[in-house]
Image (cartoon, rainbow, N blue to C red):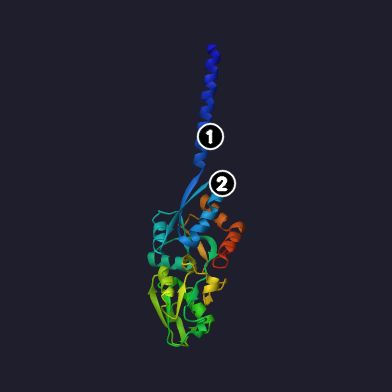
Amino acid sequence: MKKKWIAGLTSIVAVSLLLVGCGKSSSTKETTITVGASNIPHSEILKHVQPELKKEGVNLKIKVFQDYVLPNKDLANKDLDANYFQHIPFLKNWNKQNNGTLVSAGNVHLEPIGAYSKKYKSLKAIPSGSTILVSNNVADYGRVLTILRDAGLVTLKSGTDITTATFKDIKDNKKNLKFKTDLEPKLMPQFYNNKEGAAVFINANYAVQAGLDPTKDSIALEKNSSPYVNIVAVRKGDTKKPAIKKLMKALQSKGTQQWITKKYKGAVVPAYPNGK
């Protein structure tokens, strides 16, 4: 009887050790990554793919930022594994200004920047000598100039690279418009609500956050063919990390792109996964 009892106890201990071993094996397979993101729509899109990534063994933590300055600094300093808030021209400009080496892991979506006005129903209706409000985000100047050019309000100097263009690249300013460009991006909806300027250019994420519908409330909207697609940025050499590859697969999946289209109704446009 004693031998049977000892044998049974040995079996229980063996099974327990096996279960503990399995538990350790399971936990070591899960990888945690922290991704910095703007509030809307970036953090919302990341939350959408969290369950899918969990199934793939990736524990996605999201750190929300309210500005465009800290996400790249924190990524470069290894406080983040990736960030999701910017487009390629912004990233290139940041790298240039900060001697950085951050790179794109891939495209996700486009947030069309738009012109908004409480006073006029179109850009063409804006009177001569009016002031246009633009944020201090230099990387967006080409987007603004493209919209103004398409509306017939300005022409650009020959050979101008639109992704690096500034207001100094304007050749003809037909209505002698003035541009105020020292404003914080997140404050642009406030200037619009205060009826400041003839028109205010607002990034779609801040417009949506302020309760605006870019497709209905703007008087001019950036075209879907824009090169200013929002990307996921990582440190150089990290694009091939398994967790980053799984993150991009989830963000660029057909299901996620359909979800973006349905949720944001044109205010945020899904992008093709090429053009890193």
SS type, badge 2: helix
Three-letter amino acid code of the residue under disc 1:
Cys
**Measured along the vertical axis of the image, is residue 168 above or below residue 183?**
below
Q: CA distance from mark 1 to mark 2?
A: 17 Å
Q: Which mark is residue 48?
A: none
Which of disc 2 and disc 1 is earlier in sequence?
1
Circle 2 Cα neighbour tier, 10 Å, few/some/many (<14 / 14–19 / ≥20) = few
Looking at the rendered image, the disc whose residue lies closer to the viewer, 1 or 2, is 2
Residue 190, percent from left and from top: 41, 71
**Measured along the vertical axis of the image, is residue 54 above or below residue 224?**
above
Q: Is residue 226 visible?
A: no
Q: Which mark is residue 22?
A: 1
Q: Which mark is residue 55?
A: 2
Residue 26, percent from left and from top: 52, 39
SS type, badge 1: helix
For the residues bearing labels 1 and 2, Cβ distance under 8 angstroms: no
